[in-house]
Every structure is written in C-alpha cells, then in structure tokens.
Amino acid sequence: MNHIELFAGCGGLSLGLKAVGFDLVFANEYGKMASVSFAENLCKREKRTIKELDKCKSLKSLSRGHVLQGDISKFLELVENNKVNPSLLKADLISGGPPCQGFSMAGLRKENVLKNKLPFYFLDLIHKVNPKAVLIENVVGILHAFKNDGGNKVVYKELQLALSSFGYYSVCLKIKSEDFGVPEHRPRVVIIAFRKDVFESKKRYFKKFGNLFFGPKQQNSKTPEDFIDFTREDTLEDLFEFLLIADPPKIVSSKEAIDDLTTENPPSEYVIRLNAKFKNVINYQSGPKSTIMNHQPRKHNERTTLRFQVKQLVAQDKKLSKYLNLFLLNRVKKFPVEIEREIFGTLNQISGLNTSKDMYRVLKKIMSKKHSQKVLNPDLPSHTILTIPDDNIHYCPNINRVLTVREEARIQSFPDDFIFFGKPTTGGHSREVETPQYTQVGNAVPPLLGCYLGEYLKKIIK
C-alpha cells in the first residue's frame, strides 16, 4: 500500500500509517526543521532524503521515499511541466493535514488568506494522481463559515464538493483523539474519501453507513449539509463500528503519559505499548531512560515560577482556579470573602503568606495577560497540545515549569525513539518559518490516531 503525504509536518500521521503497513512515495513539507525530523526518523538513512524544491529544476530521476521541502505550488508547477518521475504520481492514498491556523476559531477566519487556499493545492494533486483513497485531518474550525461577502462559505463543504466532482465518495467526521487512546483532549475533523470504483466495490462495509457519504451522483442535486459528530458519547459506539474497530482503547490520563519522566516510577502500560508499537518503524533507538531525547526542562524566572506554583496549587478546584485566573488577568480586584478564605488556605504553604494582605501582594506581583496557561489534570487526558510551549503547565506542585518537548510528544502519542530536530522554540514569525520542536509536536497528527485511520483505510482498499 503506497501513500503520498502532503503538509507532512514532522511525520505524526505518516508514522501511524507506516506502522500499519503503508509505504511512503514522497512527503511534502514547507518547514525546514520539520522536514529534517521527518526524514531522519522515517526515511531510509542510506541516501540523501531531503530535496529542496526551490533548488529543483526537475524531479525526473527522483526515486521514492524522499521529503520534498518547500512550497507545494513549486511541486505542482514541476508536475504541470512534466518534470516529475511518473512513479511519484502513483499512490493508493493521499493524506495530510493542510495548515490550520486560518481555520482556527481563535484566528481572524478571513477567506482571502493564502494559507486558507493551501487545502485546494492538496485537491489539485488528488485530481492528478487519482488515488484510491484520501485522508484529510484538520481543526474543527473548517466546519464554520468564513467571512466573505455572502458569509456562507464553509471549507469542509467546499472540499467535499471538489472531491465529489473528481468522482469520490467522502464523509466528514468530528472526532476526539482521546477516544483513540491518545492522552489528550483534541477535537479534530477528518475527511475520508474513496474513489467511486473502490467505494462501490466495497458495499458490504457500508451497509449501515453508506448513506452518510457524499458521492459524485449528488454533486448537482445537493450539497453536504452535515458532518458526523462523534464527539458525543451516545455516538461513540457508532464511530468504532464505522471504523471497523472491535475493541476501542481505554482513556489514558496525563499522568500515565509522562509520570515516569520526572519520578522513579516505572513507565505506564500506555508508555510500554506506545514504544513497542513503533519500535521497528523508526530509524532511531534512543536507549534507556537516562538518554531520552528532547527532555530538557525550560528555565523560568522567579516570577513565572511562582505564578505556575500558585496555579498548580488551586488547579484541581475549578471554582478557585476560575477566581484566581480572573484576578491574575486583572478582571477582578478582590475575591469574595469565602473564596478569599479558601484560596488563602490553599496557598498558605507558599513562603511569606501569613495574612490575606500578603496573599494579595504576592498575587499582584505575578499578574499576567496570558489567559491560555493551563495546568494539566493528572487524572484526565491533557488539554490540546498547542505550538506555544508556555501554555501547558506540569501538574506536579514541585515541578513549576511548562512541559518539555518529550512530555508533549508523549501526550501526542509519539514514542521515545522519535527524535525532534531544530531549536526547541522561537518567537514570532520565525516559529512558522523554522518550525521548532514545540511547533512540530503541536502541529502533528497523533500517531496513534494515524494508526486507527490507516487500519480502516487499508481494510477498505484491500
């Protein structure tokens, strides 16, 4: 089974697909450091595996298994000019996660943004390659309308309509990563499409769910009006039946994912299974615990460290945490009497807090405009791993720091043998151009999710 990976990032989705038997034709990724991480972990080591598209005038002699680093439009230009080895345009599956910042509900969500057009480059290659199946993973923002003159352009509908016009049946799913054994609350949207001949020859797999697919015969009569929302518990059994999964995985907590990295406790069952699942898929073998890579703690100043400690001490009480965050954001000047008493009682182990007046003095010192900093709950899956490192605070009150790259990678379901290259982090526009380690992890598709989706696609195609 062959696949092409577009907008590949550091290789989370490809790692999952490789683990279930897919072979890479080529990957395309814009970021230089993400391309290095992909190539070093997932491509054959005996040859130079990264090709910079800006420097390529022809790919006529290029063999399979490379990362094409650069703008996907450069590759499509070479395809148009017949300067690509025809073997690179043959695949059973095209997969990937087009950049999602423009679709994010936290963004401006404007239609005429270059990044928002990148999914349609993805479609251009689908049209040329005509694979048996297509897999697109993205943020839930693609379910909502963009700002345009009519105010009614919805990205997932545009994608499905385009796939329909190419002769594909497609379905749009809203899922949660934690339902697939990933220790992270990460709502995502997945579009799965099958070429008409594949879909119609596999009808026995679609007895119950075939009517959910938007197909080529519908393109002139209607538009896809709904997606399948599998984030609701009452539809979870349907999700696993749809994906032909007989034994759904259990929910995994943050503590199960990262506890052994900072304690003498042995790795959890989750960590053991994760490392075993990908052991023969990755080029690197990191060795014993003492040599685990990408696990250098971030250094914080005294003020930031104290803010993290204060947040950690009240984090597991939702009411106190809510009031504390409002105060630190300067949205309230004083706590209600009962809340003040409870917060003081919780924080009195901090040195120098003898009275409530002392407490207010300390809290004023650590006020911050950062509203997204959250402490992990050790007993629940992590909140969504983002690309900025100072958003995720460790759950342990004596570890007053953000998560390391390796801790975030564990939560995203990367095994310890997967090494991330480049700077740990950088700021501003450089973060998009250089794709540092934290950005690579935050942008990735969880490999475990990739495994489940890959198994489903393989069963249908084969």
Image (cartoon, helix red, strand yellow):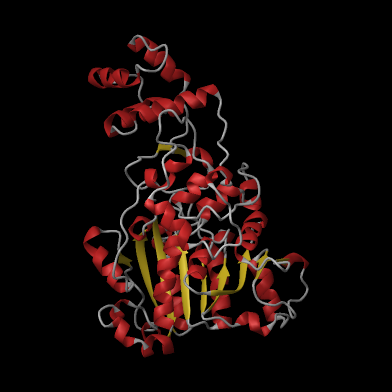
* Residue beneath the point at 38% across and 52% down: 269
User: Toward the viewer: 376 or 137?
Assistant: 376
* Residue beneath the point at 29% across and 70% down: 246
Q: Position of residue 360 (x, y in %)?
A: 38, 15
User: Toward the viewer: 150 or 425?
Assistant: 425
Asked where in the image residue 242 lies, by quadrant, the reply is bottom left
Q: Position of residue 235 (x, y in %)?
A: 24, 64
**Residue 153 visible in the current orientation:** no
Does 254 sit above or below residue 321?
below
Does 210 sit above or below residue 28?
below
For the C terminus, give its image quadrant. Answer: bottom left
Asked where in the image residue 373 lies, by quadrant, the reply is top left
The mark total stands at 0
Does 171 sit above or below residue 352?
below
Q: Position of residue 77 (x, y in %)?
A: 69, 75
* Residue beneath the point at 35% across and 40% down: 377
Does 166 sit above or below residue 236?
below
User: Toward the viewer: 28 or 412?
Assistant: 412
User: Toward the viewer: 370 or 106?
Assistant: 370
Q: On the rendered structure, is 61 left or right of 229?
A: right
Q: On the rendered structure, is 227 left or right of 461?
A: left
Asked where in the image residue 32 lies, by quadrant, the reply is bottom right
Q: Position of residue 101 (x, y in %)?
A: 51, 54
**Residue 251 visible in the current orientation:** yes
